[in-house]
Amino acid sequence: MFDSIPIIDVGPLVRKKGDEDFREDPEVRNVVHQLDLACRNVGFFYVSGHGIPLELCQAVLDVGHEFFSQPESQKLRIAMSSSTGFRGYQKLGENVTKGLPDQHEAIDYFKEFESTKVALRSENPLVGLNQWPDSVSKFRPLVQEYLEMLIELARTIMRGIALALGGPKDLFEGERAGDPFWILRVIGYPPISNLSCLSNPNGEEVGCGDHTDYGLLTLVNQDLDITALQVKTQDGKYIWVDPIPGTFVVNIGDMLTIWTNGLYQSTLHRVMNNDSKYRVSVPFFYEPNFDARVEPFSFLQDSTAAESKRYTPVVYGDHVINKVLNNFG
Ligand SMILES: O=C(O)CCC(=O)C(=O)O
Ligand SMILES: [Fe+2]
């Protein structure tokens, strides 16, 4: 049972990731222990000490605000469609979670496939080029710089999680997540008071409905002056995830649940922007290799869920294609 989100200073992981004795270092071991507790009990944690400049995080949110404040015709110039590989801008209400329209607009970026066998598979609907708004000139260079840093940070945190599971530090490298797929969403949530009456069955206006994230690890950069993200506890209550300057909100996704045979569970969460201001958040989803087969680690199966609870293996790429097509196809 949890009633708050822990804060983990990942500084030692970041500073010592190249060290020979990384695994034995007392500071690293301390971080690894905290990661283990957070992943077992909460599924969410803040990370501080990550080394990514606050100004860069803020600048990414600022260009998001600038983009969304434009007239719709301008935004639709980078509209998402099946012909863009589902990359680009989607209007308010176009995104659907569990059959209900979400009250947000967004731009979606996916890792671009190189001409490997994945890209050449004609049935892969996510093959395409990312859509960059030239109306906001700083957008592309800033977001690209940010992406490179976030990929590296997520990889470092996954190294800590590998040790937390008692595995080798490269557990999530190679065929599993050595060539990680990623998704970046720049999301805008209008204040609920501005919305017409599209509500969920409970009469609530939901920016993004209850869901777990479907990949490996999510890092959320959110506006600092609005609290809108909520995490569901085991007894069904929601707790608000207040923004903390200099941190990312990190949560684990469904692929980690499968790999750990349920030891680390992805946690339900949703977004409600009850504030009077427009909110921007930029979640970054660090994922397995596109063609990774995800199945419970054999070294964990004895110590985790009973046979009946075993998770069904999936190929990550099939899983994500399914999710995207269900939403927009
Ligand atoms: O906007 C947020 O704070 C989180 C959004 C989210 O949960 C998601 O896009 O998966
Ligand atoms: Fe999420």
Image (cartoon, helix red, strand yellow):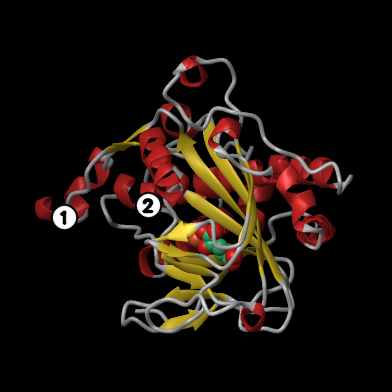
Looking at the picture, tell me which residue is in the foreground, 136 or 72: 72
Q: Does dot 1 land on a helix, a strand or a loop?
A: helix
Q: Residue at x 23, y 39 (%)?
A: 298
The percent position of residue 68, horizontal first and vertical second, equals 76, 60
Assess mark 2: CB under 8 A from ligand 2? no
In the rendered view, does 254 fall on the left or right side of 309? Answer: right
Is residue 161 among what the camera can see?
A: yes
Q: Residue at x 41, y 34 (%)?
A: 317
Residue 120 to residue 61: above or below:
above
Distance from disc 1 to disc 2, alpha carbons, whole Å, reads 15 Å
Q: Residue at x 34, y 60 (%)?
A: 265
* Residue designated by label 1: 309
**Residue under pointer 2:** 254
Q: What amino acid is found at the position of numbered circle 2 in the picture?
A: Asp
Instruction: Pinpoint residue 248: horizontal percent, then vertical percent.
Output: 64, 62
Where residue 135 sits: x, y (%)? 86, 46
Q: Earlier in the sequence, mark 1 or mark 2?
A: 2
Quarter containing the N terminus: bottom left
Residue shown at 76% from the left, 40% from the top: 132
Left or right relative to 149: residue 291 = left
**Label 2 element class:** helix
